[in-house]
Image (cartoon, rainbow, N blue to C red):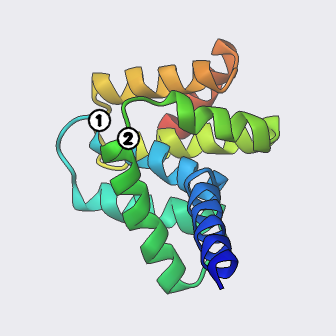
Amino acid sequence: MLKKVFDLFDQSSDETEASRDSVELATAALFSEIVHADNTIDEREKEAYREVLKRHFTLDQQALDSLAEEGHETADDSVGLVHFTQIINKKCSDEQKKNILTSLWELAYADDNLAPMEEHTIRRIADLLYIPHSQFIKTKLSVSDE
């Protein structure tokens, strides 16, 4: 009986650890960092945040709502970007990281105003994801031209 209780606790802590270290949550937290970077959250940014999450991950509406909320909470509770980028570096290809970078720029431009702090945060994320500066610039220009 006691073993079953311990197994239950071990299983729930493993699930909590796995969900905290998921690519989905790490990506949602990075996206949230951009939405909150300029300390003003526009409705267009909120909508873009949800659209970008929907495009990156195949989720039903309830899962999408949960991921969006968890992404904001995780970003608010974090002390930096390193943990999130480490997860993405371990589990994502270069192409997936490039797609994340593109989405970061889309979020930054969602309110038609690129704040310096948004650009700075994207630069830090790109560096932590080992994305070359040339790709950083190309992606920025491709999104800003749209």
* Residue 134: image tag: none
Q: Could you say where residue 42 lies in the image, as x and y percent from the top left?
A: 22, 54
Mark 2 packing: few (<14 Cα in 10 Å), some, or many (20+)?
many
Work out whether 89 lies above or below 133: below
Which amino acid does the dot numbered 2 rest on? Glu
Circle 1 residue: 37
Assess whether mark 1 and mark 2 are in contact (beta carbons under 8 angstroms). yes
* Residue 33: image tag: 2
Based on the displayed image, in which of its 4 quarters is residue 4 positioned? Answer: bottom right
Based on the displayed image, in which of its 4 quarters is residue 46 positioned? Answer: bottom left
Which residue is located at x 24 percent, y 62 percent?
A: 43
Q: Could you say where residue 119 lies in the image, as x and y percent from the top left?
A: 40, 25
Q: Could you say where residue 88 lies in the image, as x and y percent from the top left?
A: 68, 40
Which residue is located at x 55 percent, y 54 percent?
A: 20
Which residue is located at x 61 percent, y 31 percent?
A: 139
Work out whether 122 lies above or below 143: above
Instruction: Tell me the CA gap for discs 2 and 1.
Output: 6 Å
Which amino acid does the dot numbered 1 rest on? Ala
**Horizontal relation, residue 56 to residue 52: left or right:** right
Asked whether residue 72 is in view, the answer is yes
Based on the displayed image, in which of its 4 quarters is residue 7 positioned? Answer: bottom right
**Horizontal relation, residue 28 to residue 36: left or right:** right
Work out whether 53 lies above or below 66: above
Q: In front here: 85 or 48?
A: 85
Q: Could you say where residue 26 lies in the image, as x and y percent from the top left?
A: 56, 48
